[in-house]
């Protein structure tokens, strides 16, 4: 009898343990991102009082921005879980039109651009979402995330109700919005708010534009609360009836809050973009916003009962040529890193900002936060020796068919890519000259050109150098201008004028040059693939420039994150396994390019570097970043 009683006790314990475990699993599976089992999904984000509500309950937005297009898909969940572990409850995400629709007839929503998979993952992790679908998103992207083929129309007026622009927006929204509609809060998804355009108050060229975008979203099924986002100066002209105005800032100024409350009384206050740092431009310094200063602003926002979104919580990387550029006080293109001095570094590492923010939000939420996930290993791989060389001139027969034109044609209007023109990269313009003299570019080189006579380098055109001396010579000679799109301005009233390449006459002794042969060198993966057939040669002591250099990186075992350094090189682009990792430039500040492990293969990896002027023939791989000399904001 004693044995039977003992077995029954064991059975009861096992049953209780099993039921407890089952209840916990059911709770974790069915709870919403707020941690509650029951959420009133018929009532979305409420904005009709001084505080937000969600599902009819008081709610504080504690958000952070994360861009799926600035990190490998394999790392999406890692960054989200780290966001959750910091105490945030909301993820804000921008949708880049330029990447989703690189050509008029093609929309891409697969691989690293699978917005539906990203939203599914946010819901799985337990984060609410504020969606910023544009069409203009800014985000320090080339042309603010607008596709360059819009500029093929010489009369184009971006971010207005100009017929050509709204027709393109309608096509894009017809594809994008139906994909995100099922993810809205009232439909059981994570999206609690949708932003109408971005920072339109500082642009404000068309009084009807914001209403058009608002109605375009609603007509396609967006039913959650709408937001607009502006700084102090833009608040007056950036709003639209039926959308909550939100504020952007970096340092707390009570006048900003008072003005917002004057413009929009009896409404909750959301700092939509609290800038955690700043982007960097080539030739400048790496910007840092001290952690103590950021935490002081966040603490004050919370003390005032306001909601907040950190831009950026995780910045990431401007892979390829997606970086934008600053227009003022003078043109400056942005670096490849988008680390942004954010709480999570470019490689997803915790920073002092992260730890201080986590401590602050843990005390504010009065709850134990999830454990911080482990970090990805960084590897210092063996140096890759680049032992093969291909000059630019030898590569030309293996690129796009050249185009002949009496006058220069800008990138966007070249007859390539199925009539969509060239978006990024370099364009080579060649013509014949019979004499030397003064070569003047005016403002018609956008943005930077290496100039050659019979493939011999003679100088550089850029925004501050508009004249070169062409040496005298006998007979006909070939004048070549290799023009680089360094990045279109992402935020200014000059956006309509962001055509690249040669955009007007180039004068030799006051006479316009004519009869050009034009090569499109867009540096895409397809472009790099085409070079496999080219006659690569062993590197000599004096290879010709510009040129491509090729070598191998061996990875033993599972690939890890690493950072590429190119000391002894000048300026160019790095490709790993055919993928454009981004630009490097000895002008700094950035000294190392982030190379995520998911971009590498176990075993042999191809490394190709396109270099403009000087090469050391090897690429170093280190286990720590180097963003250059730092200056505090």
Image (spheres, helix red, strand yellow):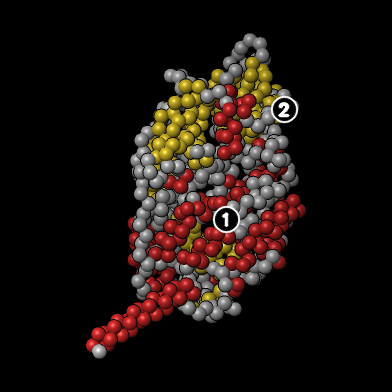
In the picture as drawn, the residue positioned furthest to the top comes out as: 474
Tell me residue 295's x, y (percent): 38, 62
Examine the rendered structure and indicate whether residue 287 appears above or below residue 368: above
Judge from the rendering whether residue 508 lies leftward or rightward of residue 457; answer left or right: right
Using the image as rendered, state which of residue 443 and residue 540 is in the foreground. 540
Query: Residue at point 64% right, 27% down?
Result: 429
Q: Tell me if residue 594 can be seen.
A: no
3D distance between C-alphas at marks 1 and 2: 39 Å
Judge from the rendering whether residue 303 lies leftward or rightward of residue 215; answer left or right: left
Tell me residue 35's x, y (percent): 45, 74
Task: Name the quadrant containing residue 159.
Answer: bottom right
Q: Tell me if residue 23 can be seen.
A: yes
**Marks 1 and 2 in Cβ contact (< 8 Å):** no
> For the residues carrying marks 1 and 2, which lies nearer the camera in this image?
1
Query: Residue at point 53% right, 65% down?
Result: 129
Using the image as rendered, state which of residue 386 and residue 316 is in the foreground. 386
Mark seen at residue 114:
1
Examine the rendered structure and indicate whether residue 420 appears above or below residue 404: below
In the picture as drawn, the residue positioned furthest to the left comes out as: 2
Mark seen at residue 404:
2
Using the image as rendered, state which of residue 359 and residue 268 is in the foreground. 359
Using the image as rendered, state which of residue 408 and residue 283 is in the foreground. 408
Query: Pointer 1: residues within 10 angstroms few (<14), some, or many (20+)?
Result: some
């Amino acid at each position: 009898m004693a044995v039977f009683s003992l077995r029954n006790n064991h059975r009861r314990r096992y049953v209780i343990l099993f039921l407890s475990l089952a209840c916990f699993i059911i709770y974790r599976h069915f709870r919403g991102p707020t941690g509650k089992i029951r959420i009133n999904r018929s009532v979305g984000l409420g904005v009709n009082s001084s505080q937000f509500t969600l599902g009819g309950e008081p709610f504080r937005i504690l958000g952070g921005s994360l861009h799926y297009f600035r990190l490998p898909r394999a790392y999406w969940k890692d960054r989200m879980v780290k966001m959750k572990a910091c105490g945030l409850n909301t993820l804000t995400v921008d949708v880049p039109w330029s990447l989703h629709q690189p050509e008029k007839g093609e929309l891409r929503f697969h691989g690293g651009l699978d917005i539906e998979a990203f939203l599914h993952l946010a819901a799985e992790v337990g984060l609410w979402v504020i969606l910023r679908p544009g069409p203009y998103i800014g985000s320090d992207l080339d042309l603010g995330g607008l596709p360059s083929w819009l500029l093929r129309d010489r009369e184009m007026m971006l971010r207005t109700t100009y017929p050509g622009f709204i027709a393109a927006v309608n096509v894009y929204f017809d594809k994008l919005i139906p994909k995100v509609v099922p993810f809205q809060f009232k439909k059981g998804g994570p999206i609690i708010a949708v932003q109408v355009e971005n920072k339109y108050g500082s642009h404000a060229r068309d009084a009807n534009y914001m209403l058009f975008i608002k109605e375009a979203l609603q007509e396609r099924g967006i039913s959650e609360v709408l937001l607009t986002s502006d700084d102090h100066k833009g608040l007056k002209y950036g709003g639209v009836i039926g959308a909550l105005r939100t504020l952007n800032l970096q340092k707390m100024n009570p006048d900003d809050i008072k003005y917002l409350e004057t413009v929009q009384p009896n409404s909750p206050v959301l700092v939509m973009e609290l800038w955690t740092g700043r982007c960097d431009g080539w030739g400048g310094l790496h910007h840092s916003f001290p952690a103590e200063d950021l935490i002081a602003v966040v603490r004050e926002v919370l003390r005032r009962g306001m909601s907040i979104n950190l831009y950026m919580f995780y910045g990431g990387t401007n892979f390829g040529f997606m970086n934008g550029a600053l227009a003022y006080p003078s043109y400056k293109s942005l670096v490849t890193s988008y680390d942004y001095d954010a709480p999570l570094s470019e490689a997803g590492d915790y920073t002092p900002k992260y730890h201080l923010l986590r401590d602050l939000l843990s005390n504010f939420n009065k709850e134990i936060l999830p454990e911080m996930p482990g970090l990805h290993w960084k590897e210092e791989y063996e140096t890759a020796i680049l032992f093969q060389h291909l000059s630019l001139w030898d590569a030309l027969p293996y690129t796009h068919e050249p185009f002949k034109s009496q006058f220069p044609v800008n990138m966007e209007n070249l007859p390539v890519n199925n009539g969509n023109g060239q978006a990024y990269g370099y364009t080579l313009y060649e013509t014949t000259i019979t004499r030397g003299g003064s070569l003047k570019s005016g403002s018609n080189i956008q943005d930077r050109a290496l100039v050659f006579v019979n493939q011999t380098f003679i100088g550089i055109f850029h925004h501050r150098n508009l004249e070169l001396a062409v040496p005298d010579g006998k007979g006909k000679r070939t004048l070549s201008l290799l023009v680089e799109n360094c990045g279109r301005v992402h935020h200014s009233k000059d956006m309509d004028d962001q055509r690249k390449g040669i955009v007007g006459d180039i004068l030799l002794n006051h006479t316009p040059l004519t009869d050009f042969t034009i090569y499109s060198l867009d540096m895409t993966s397809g472009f790099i693939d085409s070079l496999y057939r080219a006659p690569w040669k062993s590197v000599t002591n004096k290879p010709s420039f510009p040129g491509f250099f090729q070598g191998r990186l061996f990875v033993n075992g599972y690939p890890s994150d690493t950072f590429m350094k190119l000391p002894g090189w000048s300026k160019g682009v790095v490709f790993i396994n055919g993928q454009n990792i981004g630009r490097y430039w000895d002008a700094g500040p950035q000294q190392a390019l982030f190379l995520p492990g998911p971009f590498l293969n176990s075993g042999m990896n191809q490394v190709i570097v396109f270099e403009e002027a000087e090469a050391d023939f090897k690429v170093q791989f280190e286990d720590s970043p180097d963003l250059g000399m730092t200056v505090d904001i």
